[in-house]
Image (cartoon, rainbow, N blue to C red):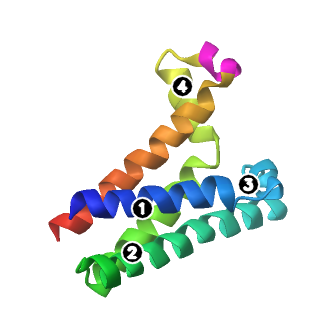
């Protein structure tokens, strides 16, 4: 069940981070302003909504059995972890403190950002499969 859950969450992530994220969200979601927090909330909410739809379809079409409480906890984790990483400062902090500061300016932050998101999805899928 882990693999199915992970794939569904990964597809939801790709849809939400690339196909459904607006330029406005991408540009403003890290700002510490009302506009920034709103853009971040809508973007994280998109992740939660798309993940919920795909988990629901997984339950219907693939027979994945998730209790509502486990699914809700996973969706809260997905939204919260995504919003945290997308503030951008956690990625910058990580790269600065792990010897990758020069790579920030060469596009490395986007790779670390995506790695953090995918790791969070893996954690969600693992916990859901275990419960």
First in sequence: mark 4 vs mark 3: 3
What residue is at 62 percent from the left and 54 percent from the top?
A: 17
Distance from Cα at disc 2 to Cα at disc 3: 26 Å
Q: Position of residue 14 (x, y in %)?
A: 55, 54
Distance from Cα at disc 4 to Cα at disc 1: 26 Å
- Magenta segment boundaries in residue numbering: 102-106
Distance from Cα at disc 1 to Cα at disc 3: 21 Å
Label 2 Cα neighbours within 10 Å, binned few <14 / some 14-19 / many ≥20: many
Vertical side of 95 occupied by 112: above or below: below
Distance from Cα at disc 2 to Cα at disc 4: 32 Å
- In the rendered structure, find residue 80 and report the number of the disc placed on it: none
Describe the element under mark 1 as helix, strand or loop.
Answer: helix
Quarter of the image that includes the N terminus = bottom left
- Disc 4 designates what residue? 95
What residue is at 65 percent from the left and 52 percent from the top?
A: 18
Classified by dominant secondary structure, the portion drawn in magenta counts as helix
Describe the element under mark 4 as helix, strand or loop.
Answer: helix
Single out the residue that lies furthest toward the left: 130
- Disc 2 designates what residue? 55
What residue is at 55 percent from the left and 48 percent from the top?
A: 85
Task: Say whether marks 2 and 3 touch (CB < 8 Å).
Answer: no
Label 4 Cα neighbours within 10 Å, binned few <14 / some 14-19 / many ≥20: some
Task: Say whether marks 2 and 1 touch (CB < 8 Å).
Answer: yes
- Disc 1 designates what residue? 9
- Disc 3 designates what residue? 29
Describe the element under mark 3 as helix, strand or loop.
Answer: loop
Vertical side of 29 occupied by 51: above or below: below
């Amino acid at each position: 069940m882990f693999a199915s859950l992970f794939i569904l969450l990964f597809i939801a992530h790709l849809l939400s981070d690339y196909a459904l994220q607006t330029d406005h969200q991408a540009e403003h979601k890290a700002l510490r302003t009302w506009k920034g927090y709103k853009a971040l909330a809508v973007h994280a909410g998109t992740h939660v909504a798309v993940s919920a739809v795909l988990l629901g379809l997984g339950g219907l079409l693939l027979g994945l059995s998730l209790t509502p409480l486990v699914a809700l906890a996973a969706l809260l984790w997905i939204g919260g972890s995504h919003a945290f990483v997308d503030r951008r400062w956690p990625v910058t902090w990580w790269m600065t403190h792990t010897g990758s500061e020069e790579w920030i300016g060469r596009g490395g932050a986007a790779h670390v950002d995506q790695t953090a998101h995918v790791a969070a999805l893996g954690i969600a899928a693992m916990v859901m499969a275990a419960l």
